[in-house]
Amino acid sequence: MDISQILFYALSALALGSAIMVVISRNPVHSVLWLIITFFAISGHYILMNAQFLGIVNLIVYAGAIMVLFLFVIMLMNLNAETEPQKNKWLKLAGVVAGGCLLLVMVAALKQAEVKGQVAMLGTGDIGLIKNLGQALFTDYVVPFEISSVLFLSAMVGAVVIGKK
Amino acid sequence: MLIERYIYLAIALFCIGIVGVLARRNAIIIFMCIELMLNAVNLLLVAFSKMHYAVGVAKNATAGIDGQLFVFFIMVVAAAEVSVGLAIIVMMYRNTHSVDVNFLNRLKH
């Protein structure tokens, strides 16, 4: 077992464990902090696959900007474990059973998949570097890139209009 | 690394997000679980992009680069979604003084 495999399993365990803690922790602030750890683990996966640009963007955009926005809103509302709304026990159990059934169905569907046995190469390849990604982004994908700027503008206007009421 | 390990990991993360959406009532936690599901899909897209790179690099030096660009656009859309969604949650809190999604059934009146 070489170092990249050990890193893969460690990062996977970290991502799954902290994702479970996001769901089960009572205090919303703790949920946000666990979700940040999950995003760090996923960024580690990206860097392990040599997708360096996405790894850094994931850290800056998700763990940096979006999670700080969540934390800001939670602290603005002064939410904590006491004000946490509780569902009754059976509804929670039904949610867990439904999610478990989805997991079971997806894993069973994968049993016959034709991609089985193919390899995602770790640590090699230069398609994840910013030079190649930027070249593809500004040649083949330049129209979606410009449209996404309009999307951001409309999201900004929407947030301001909703917030001003 | 075999691709199915990444698929199992992404399925597990996605299902944890589904359980969070179904079992919690706090609107902000539900929103965070949606982000978790988006990230599970992003991870799978990058893994498949590396798989296609391994298969097609002999013919095309940038095989599989589309997957990583899709991840970039998903991040863009997620950022826009969060800004609008959190504004909606703040407005809901101002009107009902709670983030319990069950209070949202008042929307029908």
Image: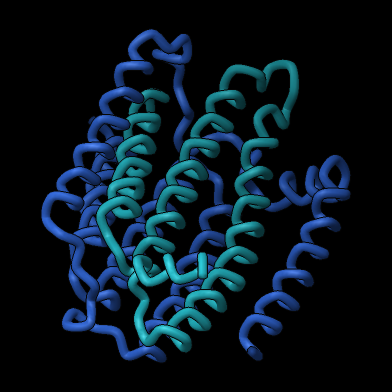
Chain colours: A blue, B cyan
- The image position of residue A108, as x and y in percent, is 30, 17
**A82 displayed left or right of B41:** left
| Between B1 and B21, the one nearer to me in the picture | B21
Q: Residue at x 63, y 42 (%)?
A: B68
Extreme front residue here? B109
| Whole-percent x, y for residue B73 in the image | 67, 51
Which residue is pictured at 61% across the width and 71% down the height? Answer: B84
Residue A149 % position (x, y): 80, 64
Whether residue B30 is visible to the viewer of this picture, yes or no, is yes
Q: Is residue A108 left or right of residue A44?
A: left
Q: Which percent across, then down, holds residue B54?
A: 57, 22
Residue A29: which quarter of the image?
A: bottom left
Residue in the picture at 24% in, 46% down: A95
For the image, the number of numbered tags is 0
Is B86 on the left-hand or right-hand side of A127? Answer: left
Give the position of the C terminus of chain A as an image quadrant: bottom right
Residue at the farthest left position: A89
Please, is residue A140 above or below residue A80 in the view? above
> From this viewpoint, is residue A47 visible?
no
Image quarter hosting the N terminus of chain A:
top left
**Taking B4 as reference, is B31 above or below it?**
below
Task: State left or right for residue A162 relative to residue A69.
Answer: right
Q: Residue at x 19, y 51 (%)?
A: A91
Q: Nearer the viewer, residue A79 or A8?
A: A79
Nearer-the-camera pick, B25 or B29: B25
The foreground one among A99 and A147 is A99
